Image (spheres, coloured by chain):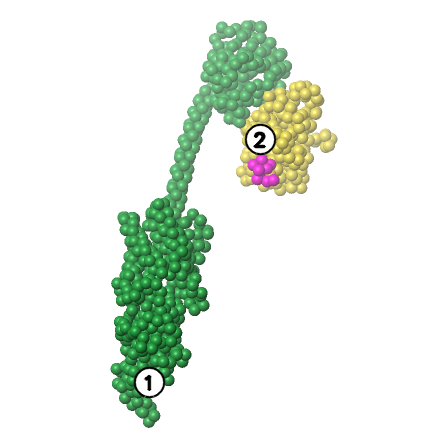
Chain colours: A yellow, B green
Amino acid sequence: MTTDASSLTRVALVEDDPDARARIVESIRQQSSLQLVAEYSTGGGALTGLESGAPDVLLVDLGLPDIPGLDIVRFVSHRHPDCDILVITIFGDEANVLAALEAGARGYLLKGSLQRDIALDIQDLRNGGSPLSPVIARQVLKRLRPPAPEKKMAADEDTLLTGRESEILNAISRGFSYAETAQMLGVSVGTVHTFLKRIYRKLAVHSKTEAVFEANRLGLIR
Amino acid sequence: MRSLLCAVALALTAQPAHAEYAVRVLDQGEFVLSSSWTPPPDSAPWRPVQLPDNWYLSRPGPARTGWYRLAYDLSREQARIIHSFYLPRNSASRMVFFSDGGWQGNSRLYGDPGTSNWAPPLLHSIAPPLLKPGRNVLYIRVEAIPEMRQGLTRVTLVQGLDARALYESRYVTQITTLFMFGAAAFFCGLMAAAFWFRERGETTLLWFAVTALAWAVATSPWLHATFTPQAFFHGPLAFAVRFAYAAPMLVLCLRVAGRRSHAGEAALWGFTLAGLGLAWLFDDEYQGSVITYWSMAYLAALLALLLVLFRSQRGRRGWAFWSLTAALVLAVLLNAHDFAWWMGWLDYDSFQLAHFHIPLVLFAIGATIIDRHFQAVHAVERAKVELEGRVAEKAREIEANYARVQKAERENALARERQRIMADMHDGLGSTLVGLLGAVQSGSTSQAEIERRLHDALQEMRLAVDALEPTDGDLGVILGNVRHRMRAAIESSGVRFHWQVDELPQIPSLTPKAVLDIQRILLEALTNSLRHGRASDLTVSTRVNGSSLQIGIADNGIGFDQTSAAQGRGLDSLRRRARGLGASVDVRSAPGAGTSVTLRLPLGAR
């Protein structure tokens, strides 16, 4: 740990399975730009440990024995908005990942990935966001798509997609990489990352107002 | 104490002495036609007469005036006691009483000699100064209309004031009951009218109100007989209201009996209107005939009504029916009684009772209406309970059906999924794991190879999970997902990857199994190319060609000999999967010329 502390990405891990934890820890150690600052085997321990301060990146297993991993995601993203959270899942299935994104996560890590890939994913995350799967991109598109103009409400504006954001999500949902998407839209990859960050934020904000939104849609609130 | 004994002794001695004169009915007298205002002299042509004297029978014709002379003897003691004359009915247009040469000024008179309707009794007292021992004479001047059954009743002479009891009992029967019934009918009529006002459809209530109020009006002119102008109230109005209550009552009875004969009701109204008109047209002399015909018609109508009623409602005769029938039977009897009196067939002094029938009938009808109302209410309540029961039952049935259908669908879906997963496990993961186990057991396979194959198995599983994701059959997403899953493999291979995928159609009916098969075909083709192709460029392209979608995976690698058996097995599995989809796979390759795999997927077929 002789490298300049400011350029290091500080990583914390919440994972109950010792083997999986060991593998991830190992893969982080191998990456010189990453620094493991804490590891927790229980959700309760993580909540206590992350109360006062958070690392740059937090890896959270969704299937913890004591409390739901999503609760930790929610807690940390609310408490430390600058902390990037990756959830750890076996399949990367839509239901879990979307819930995690809505809770404030920035992406996910597949359990059982090659160790090299774990480090890559973390780097991707720091660069702009982990790759969004087409299935999830499509769901986000569906969820945040602006309704017909006449049904639109002022309050929705900050949580609904702009035209550009929709275009980006559409491209990703059809399997294009960020670079290809950037090229198709005539923007830089960095711009795509910026857009994605904004989309993630919208998703999180949107999920909080979703109950209200749903009630609006059903005409329960006027 | 002594004085008390004296009083008792006096009372005992006095009683037998007066007993023989206490009450004497004067039914013999003399009569002379004369309109003089003082009693005619003895020289006038007095003729003996029997009381009661009904002029309709004894001297029919126009209205006249005559004098009666009634003689009675009194002892010296009796002449010192006040006497009363009691007449059961005021039976003439006007009566004036004289006692033996002295004007009646000193006597007291109960009852109103002017009231000719409803026939109140009269009580007429004579003070001792007007009485003398021996023969006394009572002169009564009578103005009477024979047609109206006027004349003179028997005169009862009562010693002292005991006649008051006779008077009161007659008055109660003839007059007090009348007023009571009138007042009761008035309030019942108002109530019925109020109810009808809320329920305009209930015409029975309207007829009830009209009948009751007309009857109340019919009784009202005699509430204060001395005050009312005779000429109007005792003549035309009396007739008019008689007609006014009779017709609505008959209509009402018909309706209550369940008969709504328009002709019958029209006839009744015609009869009423004709009667009203006639009553106003005729003089006193003809009113008698009008009453006769009216009474006959009314009696006939009542009898007819009774017949109609008795022939109706067979099989469902409740107490309401019987009470109405009983009321009508009584009505017929009471009216028949009064009609017989009117015709002179009964004693002239008899009671007049017809007015009792109105409250009886009104009561019976009111009971019927209330009975019907409650029956209707109960029927509605029963119907409501029954309906609620049925609705609840239907709801339960629908719920149960729905639950059954849902359960069946769920079970069906579960069974399909189980089948699919079983098949997948068997073909894919199962065989991969068995192969792996064999490799590990033999020890001949390298660690790297085992790791690779384990990753393949995991990839296989993830693909299976992906196939279950909600893609709504969006082919773009389905293809995109394959690339996403292979991202790491593609990136680490160093190949230049070209993703030339257009906007692709959506096939919402695509099943998870079909999605998985498409993804597997693409995955296998891509994996083959990456592992064996040694290509520098790998292109995935799509083209919609009419009703089919072509997905091409082409590389510029080393290619292979399509005739070699080892390659053939892999191609066979691709083709088998494609056939299951209704699709086809076209593989073109030759050593050194790259490989191109084309999947042709029919659109809309699935």
Q: Point out which mark residue B132 bears.
A: 1
Name the residue nearer the viewer: B229 or B604. Answer: B229
Find residue B346 and report its horizontal and vertical position in percent: 26, 64
Crowding near the residue tagged with mark 2, few <14, some 14–19, many ≥20 C-alpha atoms within 10 Å: many
Three-letter residue code for mark 1: Lys
Subunit ID for the residue under disc 1? B
Find residue A168 and report its horizontal and vertical position in percent: 65, 24
Please report the residue visible at 65 percent of the width from the left and 29 percent of the height from the top.
Answer: A161
Three-letter residue code for mark 2: Val
Q: Is residue B347 visible?
A: yes
Query: Is A217 inside the magenta-drawn segment?
Result: yes
Residue B52 position by quadrant? bottom left
Find residue B360 and report its horizontal and vertical position in percent: 34, 59
The magenta stretch spans which residues? A213-222
Q: Point out which mark residue A60 bears.
A: none
Horizontally, is B327 left or right of B499 in the view? Answer: left
Residue B165 position by quadrant? bottom left
Please report the residue visible at 39 percent of the width from the left and 52 percent of the height from the top.
Answer: B273
Subunit ID for the residue under disc 2? A
Q: Is residue B359 visible?
A: no
Horizontally, is B90 left or right of B534 in the view? Answer: left
Whether residues under marks 1 and 2 lie with C-beta atoms below 8 angstroms apart, the answer is no
